């Protein structure tokens, strides 16, 4: 591959994207975001991939947007080129995306993790929105997604003071699904991807869409969407296989 700032591999049903700019603690520059968007699209289209893992190094998932690159930006030119737009590529991915976070997930790094579907954290993970220390605010959804994930009290404190939150606190607060030892992080993420890979793909895709709709829709509309999806799944092989296997007391085998 022609990527310079990310590594790209498959392991089981997982497509693994590793942010790889160690000298800058994986600071997210424009070139890396373009590569990430490309890799995400390729893995989303690859039938062998059931779930995508985005991860970084032991020291940093990502220490935020590249401050060196942003420093020269001025308004309104920066409004016209909207460099943040490509960051949202991950929101268009239909397969589950797991952020496997060790070390720093700060600013845009924390925001990137929150745009993924599941955050799995190593004990070393540190989350924060330190933009306030740069005379800025979060810019890729941090003020919104952090607040929805952990509530106003902690989100306001973190966004207003830049305080970092460790993995244990992040799990208690509801930001991360699970905390695992650092040396087991990738293996746990791959296990999760393999679990998802063993399930009915249309059910997985609809389940992701339904949960995400909870952030966008009023309750009544969200429940209506869920109901339509649920009922439509009676048209899938997965439903026939899953229910037959349960009643026959055997493991279901879902075709991908
Ligand atoms: C550019 C960065 C960087 C960043 C670290 N580096 N974070 N470069 N942009 N966001 C570089 C450092 O300049 C340094 O390069 C090298 O990585 C190692 O970092 P150190 O600071 O020496 O490491 P350490 O002392 O361990 O401190 C780690 C740290 C600190 C606490 C994570 O690096 C830090 O505070 N980084 C900035 C975090 C931040 O403010 N993030 C939010 C960015 S704004 P050299 O060349 O000196 O060795 C943002 C907005 C997003 O994300 C909005 C949407 C786009």
Image: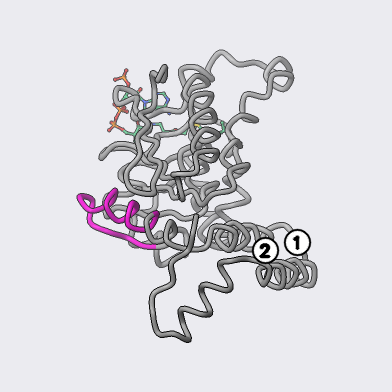
User: Does the residue at mark 1 contact the one at mark 2 (Cβ under 8 Å)?
Assistant: yes
Cα separation, mark 1 vs mark 2, equals 6 Å
When the figure is inspected, residue 37 is found, relative to residue 186, above or below; the finding is above
Residue 238, image x and y in percent?
Answer: 56, 67
- Quadrant of res 41: top right
Which of the numbered marks, if any, corresponds to residue 96? none
Q: Residue at x 32, y 44 (%)?
A: 11
Q: Residue at x 35, y 39 (%)?
A: 10
Q: Mark 1 falls on what kind of element?
A: loop
Q: Residue at x 65, y 30 (%)?
A: 85
How many C-alpha atoms fall within 10 Å of the one at disc 2: few (<14), some, or many (≥20)?
some
Instruction: Residue 21: tell me if it is visible.
Output: yes
Q: Nearer the viewer, residue 234 or 73?
A: 234
Residue 17, image x and y in percent?
Answer: 40, 36
Instruction: Report the residue that reaches farthest toward the left.
Output: 183
Instruction: Residue 162: tell me if it is visible.
Output: no
Judge whether residue 192 is colored magenta. Answer: yes
Position of the N terminus by quadrant: top left
- Quadrant of res 123: bottom left
How many C-alpha atoms fall within 10 Å of the one at disc 1: few (<14), some, or many (≥20)?
few
Q: Nearer the viewer, residue 36 or 255?
A: 255
Where does the magenta region start and end? Answer: 178-193
Is the residue indicated by label 2 positioned so its CB lies within 8 Å of ligand 1?
no
Judge whether residue 129 is colored magenta. Answer: no
Q: Main secondary structure of the magenta part?
A: helix
Left or right: 115, with 110 as reference point: right
Q: Nearer the viewer, residue 180 or 135?
A: 180
Residue 239, image x and y in percent?
Answer: 58, 72
Which of the numbered marks, if any, corresponds to residue 217? 1
Q: Mark 2 falls on what kind of element?
A: loop
Which of the numbered marks, if any, corresponds to residue 214? 2
Residue 75, image x and y in percent?
Answer: 70, 18
């Amino acid at each position: 591959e022609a990527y310079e700032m990310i590594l790209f591999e498959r392991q089981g049903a997982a497509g693994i994207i590793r942010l790889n700019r160690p000298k800058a603690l994986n600071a997210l520059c424009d070139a890396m975001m373009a590569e990430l968007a490309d890799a995400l699209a390729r893995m989303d289209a690859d039938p062998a991939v059931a779930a995508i893992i985005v991860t970084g190094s032991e020291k940093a998932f990502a220490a935020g947007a590249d401050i060196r690159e942003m420093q020269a930006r001025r308004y309104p030119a920066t409004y016209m080129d909207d460099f943040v737009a490509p960051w949202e590529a991950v929101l268009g991915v239909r397969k589950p995306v797991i952020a496997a976070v060790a070390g720093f997930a700060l600013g845009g790094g924390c925001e990137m993790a929150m745009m993924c579907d599941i955050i799995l954290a190593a004990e070393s993970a540190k989350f924060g929105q330190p933009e306030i220390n740069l005379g800025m605010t979060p810019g890729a959804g941090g003020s919104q997604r952090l607040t929805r994930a952990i509530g106003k009290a902690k989100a306001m404190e973190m966004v207003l003071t830049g305080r970092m939150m460790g993995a244990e606190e992040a799990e208690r607060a509801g930001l991360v699904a699970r905390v695992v030892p650092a040396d087991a992080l990738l293996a746990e993420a791959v296990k999760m991807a393999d679990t998802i890979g063993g399930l009915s793909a249309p059910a997985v895709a609809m389940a992701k869409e339904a949960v995400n709709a909870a952030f966008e829709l009023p309750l009544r509309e969200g429940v209506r969407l869920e109901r339509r999806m649920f009922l439509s799944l009676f048209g899938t092989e997965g439903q026939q296989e899953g229910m037959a296997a349960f009643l026959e007391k055997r493991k279901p085998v879902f075709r991908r």
